Image (tube, rainbow, N blue to C red):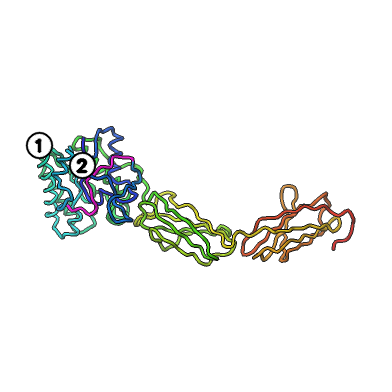
Amino acid sequence: MRILILGDSVSQGSSGDWTWRYRLWRRLVDAGVAFDLVGPRDDLWDLRADAPGAMSYADPDFDRDHAARWGMFAGMPDVPVASLVTTYQPDVVVVMLGINDLIWTDQAPAEVAARVGDLVAAARSARPDVDVVLSEVTQHWFPDAPELNAQLALLAQAATTASSRVVLAAAAAGYDVDRDTWDTSHPNARGEVRIATAVAAALHELGIGPAATLPATMPPVGPRFPATFSGTLAGAEGRLAWTSGPGATHQLLWRRDVTTGAPWTRSPVPLPRDGTLVVPGLRRHHRYDFRLQPVKGDDLPGGDVYSAVVSLVPGGPMLAPAGVRAVARGRRCVRLAWRPVPDATSYVVERRVGRTWTRPVRTTTPSWRGTRLPVAPRWTFRVRATGDQVVGPPTSVTVRPARSAAPCR
C-alpha cells in the first residue's frame, strides 16, 4: 500500500519535530499494516536557516518520504500532482492543503476547495483508481477556515466514484490553538497525534488499518534537544554563550546561588535562539549555577529538558586557612594562629569530639585562644574562613597538651 502525503508546512514539519507523518507511520506499523510512504522529499523545514533541508527529526528512524513543502498552495503545487502520481504510483493520496490559499490569496472558501478538487482530478488523470484522503485544515480559528472545511466535506462526497474513493479526515475536530500548536498555526506533539489520528481514521474508511482513536496519554510538547551552553568569568561578570538544539526558537535562563542555598529561578525575559549574555554583579566566592531551557514558540518542553549546568565562582572558591599552627599553653589551653585568607571577614574554629565537632567559635582575627579544654591526650581543631555568606574548606591541626600546669596565657 503506497501512500503519498501532499501538504504544506503542517505536513512537512520543522526542526526538532516528530511530525504527524511519523505519528501516522508509527500507528500503521504497530497495527501490522504493510505500506510505504512515498514522495520526492524526506526533509523538514530548517527554522534557523529559514529554508528546507533539515534532517533534525526528534526521531528520524521512520519512513520519511513525503510531498509536502512549507508555504505550499493548493492552487500552486511545486511539483505537478499528475507527475507525482505517475512517478510514485500511490494507492492513496493524502491531501492537506488550502489554508495558505485562504490566508494569502484572498480566495473564497469555495474557490480554494475548487483548487483542491483540481488536485484530485490531476491525481486521477495519472491513475484513475487512486483513492484520496482530504484533510480538513486544522487552523479553524482563522477567518473562513470553518467554511473551507465544510466545502472540503462537500467535495469529498461529490468527488467519490466507484473506482476512486474520496474520504474526509476530520483533523479540525477538537483541535485547539493553545493546546495543539506551538505558534497558533503549526502542530506541536499533541497536535501531531490529533492529525495522525484523524488521517488514520480516514484510511480505515478505505480499508487500511484499524479504527483510530486518540491515545489515553498524549506525548510531551516542546523541544527535545538542549542547547550547547558554556560560561566564563571576567571579574564579577559572568559571560554565557549558547547555541540552541534543533527546534528551539528561544531559550529561558535559569540560575541559582548555590552558596546561599537559593532555589532555581527563571528569568522572565526569553533569550534568543543563539547568543551571548553578560551577567553582572556576581558575588565573590559564591558559586552560581546556570542552565537553559529550550522553548519552541509558546511551548515549554515537557519533562526535564535542560542544557548542561554551567557553574561560575567569581574569585574562585574561598581558600582554606594556610600555615595553621597550634601551641599548647598548659594542660587545658591552646593558641591557634594562621595566615590571613583573602576576602575573609571572620574565621570559625571547631574542636573534634569523637566523630563530631563542637559548636563553631568565631573570631575576626587569624588567631584564637582556647581555654578550659578537657584534659585529653591530644586535641584536634579545624579552622575555616568565612565572608559574605561563604564558608571555606577547613584546615585541621592536632596538638598535645603541655605537661606543665602553667597558667593559660
Mark nearer the N terminus (1 vs 2): 2
User: Picture quarter containing residue 197?
Assistant: top left
Residue 4's label in the rendered image is 2
User: Picture quarter containing residue 393?
Assistant: bottom right
Where is residue 308 shown, x and y percent of the image?
48, 52
Locate residue 201 relative to residue 364 in the image: left or right: left
Where is residue 376 shown, x and y percent of the image?
82, 50
Image point 73% across, 58% down: which residue? 323
Check disc 2 and report its element: helix, strand or loop: strand
Residue 69: in magenta span: yes
Check disc 1 and report its element: helix, strand or loop: loop
Q: Nearer the viewer, mark 1 or mark 2?
A: 2
Locate residue 78 relative to residue 225 in the image: left or right: left
Where is residue 180 shown, x and y percent of the image?
31, 51
Q: Badge 1 is on which residue?
A: 162
Quarter in which the N terminus is drawn = top left
Quarter in which the C terminus is drawn = bottom right
Q: Who is closer to the viewer here, 186 or 155?
A: 186
Q: Which residues are magenta?
A: 61-73
